[in-house]
Image: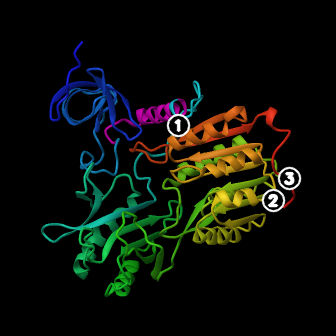
């Protein structure tokens, strides 16, 4: 049978059957896969092909012939344009099903696990108004108006926003009004093409439980005339705003924050209550964007580990101690490993603030620090960035052979890859996988995998156990 040749711009009929890990709908036509943004499994649609390959294509929704029962009206009026969310048109219950399937498929296809048992996704308390941090690029419109928002899907066109339904609603007044203040001050907006101008991004942060807020402007250099006066005005206008800062990013880069932040008015951090502890969080601190879901996942981790108080625990990639400190209260000794010196400084302050004295923190790359621990921990927590663990970390863990590993991941593809290595030759077995929804309305899913050392591997290891 002659294979039908697809042409760019051609219209084809597709029934959407699945969702990809990037959030696009996935269907089949003419024995090939088609990826279509803004579609839902169950949609029957006319799709315009925009990118064609021999075995697959990318399309754009042209006409919806029959909507999926899981399709809903988005809460945001620019949801079809803004790239901040991918799934506002999908009902929340089905979002959870799709995210569970995403974890299962990654474990099967990448990890090679056969019919892995994955728990239902830990649902968010609210599917909207949850983000405790938002960072908006700024742009000067053709008419000279200061705009802030997210980029349009698949482009570098800014969609101007005065409010965002997924961020904490208490931040919305600042988003709408600070743009006007920047306009009135005459501050120049950064032009990334010419590398000219001053202000690059507007950063907003809130303590979900305390209500304290931070406002940060990311600037090309420190010379922002009148910022001290304006910062004091913002503090007076917004009673919950506790600090205004500048962050300098002078590089030609897609990275948002630079390496140096200066507090202009108020204090350089907000206070947040997390898992019964008080944390200091700065503008550029990594802190989970959905506070309540992070607390709920921590409860699952605590319950699953059932710590008895005698354990030695290592928290790799520990950040400011978000997981380390609550777990330290339940073990004999805890150690946090983190490459960022500023994060370790905050972790030590947070431990002191909460009276936790059985924890230490070390600065350095995990792959270099872990082999030098001088002890074999019973429990290791892994919470790496999206790229996953360095291979040297995996190799060291297979030599150390801790009894239990908890791998918390924000990208299931690298989670599956690393679990395959850890479980090689049956050394570790997965006892539970608990996904959690830290990012409703998007395709992102967090997951915690619990691993136990197999009995056949408990008798020997390559390290000599010593006491700390």
* 384 and 213: which is toward the camera: 384
Q: Quadrant of the image for the N terminus? A: top left
**Disc 3 versus disc 1: nearer the observer:** 3
Q: Which residue is mark 1?
A: 121
* 459 and 263: which is toward the camera: 459
Quarter holding residue 170: bottom left
Which residue: 47% across, 77% down? 261
Classify mark 2: helix, strand or loop: loop
Marks 3 and 1 sit apart, C-alpha to C-alpha, by: 39 Å
**98 part of magenta stretch:** yes
Marks 2 and 3 sit apart, C-alpha to C-alpha, by: 8 Å
**33 part of magenta stretch:** no
* CA neighbours of label 2 inside 10 A, class few (<14), some (14 to 19), many (20+): few
Where 422 sits versus 193, above or below?
above
**Disc 1 versus disc 2: nearer the observer:** 2
Q: Say how many tags the image has.
A: 3
Classify mark 3: helix, strand or loop: loop
The first of marks 2 and 3 along the sequence is 2
Classify mark 1: helix, strand or loop: loop
* Color style of the picture: rainbow
In this picture, residue 202 sits left or right of residue 407:
left
For the record, the magenta segment spans 88-108
Where 80 sits versus 172, above or below?
above
Which residue: 44% across, 61% down? 133
Marks 1 and 2 sit apart, C-alpha to C-alpha, by: 37 Å
In this picture, residue 304 sits left or right of residue 79:
right
**What residue occupies the far top of the structure in this picture?**
1
Which residue: 84% across, 52% down? 310
Q: Which residue is mark 2?
A: 374
* CA neighbours of label 3 inside 10 A, class few (<14), some (14 to 19), many (20+): few
């Amino acid at each position: 049978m002659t294979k039908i040749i697809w042409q760019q711009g051609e219209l084809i009929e597709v029934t959407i059957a699945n969702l990809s890990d990037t959030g696009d709908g996935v269907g089949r036509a003419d024995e090939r896969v088609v990826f279509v943004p803004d579609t839902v499994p169950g949609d029957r649609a006319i799709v315009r092909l925009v990118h064609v390959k021999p075995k697959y294509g990318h399309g754009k929704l042209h006409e919806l012939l029959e909507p999926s029962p899981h399709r809903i009206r988005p809460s945001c009026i620019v949801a079809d344009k803004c790239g901040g969310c991918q799934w506002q048109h999908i009902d929340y219950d089905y979002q959870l099903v799709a995210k569970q399937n995403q974890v299962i498929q990654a474990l099967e296809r990448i990890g090679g696990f056969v019919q892995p048992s994955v728990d239902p996704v830990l649902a968010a308390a609210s599917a909207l108004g949850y983000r405790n941090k938002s960072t908006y690029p700024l742009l000067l419109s053709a008419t000279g108006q200061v705009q802030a928002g997210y980029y349009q899907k698949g482009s570098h066109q800014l969609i101007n926003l005065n409010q965002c339904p997924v961020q904490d609603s208490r931040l919305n007044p600042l988003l709408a009004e600070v743009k006007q203040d920047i306009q009135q001050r005459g501050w120049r907006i950064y032009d990334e093409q010419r590398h000219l101008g001053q202000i690059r991004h507007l950063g907003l942060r809130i303590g979900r439980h305390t209500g304290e807020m931070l406002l940060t402007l990311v600037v090309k250099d420190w010379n922002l005339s009148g910022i001290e006066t304006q910062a004091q005005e913002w503090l007076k206008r917004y009673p919950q705003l506790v600090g205004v800062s500048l962050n300098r990013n002078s590089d030609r880069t897609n990275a948002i924050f630079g390496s140096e932040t200066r507090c202009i008015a108020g204090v350089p951090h907000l206070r947040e209550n997390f898992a019964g502890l008080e944390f200091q969080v700065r503008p550029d601190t990594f802190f989970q964007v959905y506070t309540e879901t992070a607390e709920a996942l921590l409860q699952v981790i605590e319950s699953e580990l059932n710590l008895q108080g005698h354990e030695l625990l290592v928290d790799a990639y520990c950040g400011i101690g978000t997981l380390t400190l609550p777990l330290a209260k339940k073990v004999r000794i805890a150690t946090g490993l983190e490459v960022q010196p500023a994060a370790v400084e905050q972790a030590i302050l947070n431990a002191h603030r909460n009276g936790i004295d059985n924890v230490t923190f070390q600065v350095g790359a995990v792959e270099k620090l872990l082999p030098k621990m001088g002890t074999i921990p019973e429990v290791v927590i892994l919470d790496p960035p999206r790229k996953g663990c360095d291979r040297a970390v995996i190799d060291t863990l297979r030599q150390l052979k801790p009894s239990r590993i908890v791998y918390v991941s924000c990208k299931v593809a690298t989670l599956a890859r690393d679990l395959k290595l850890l479980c090689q030759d049956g050394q570790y077995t997965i006892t539970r996988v608990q996904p959690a929804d830290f990012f409703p309305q998007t395709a992102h899913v967090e997951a915690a995998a619990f691993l136990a050392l197999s009995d056949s591997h408990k008798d020997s290891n390559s390290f000599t156990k010593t006491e700390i």
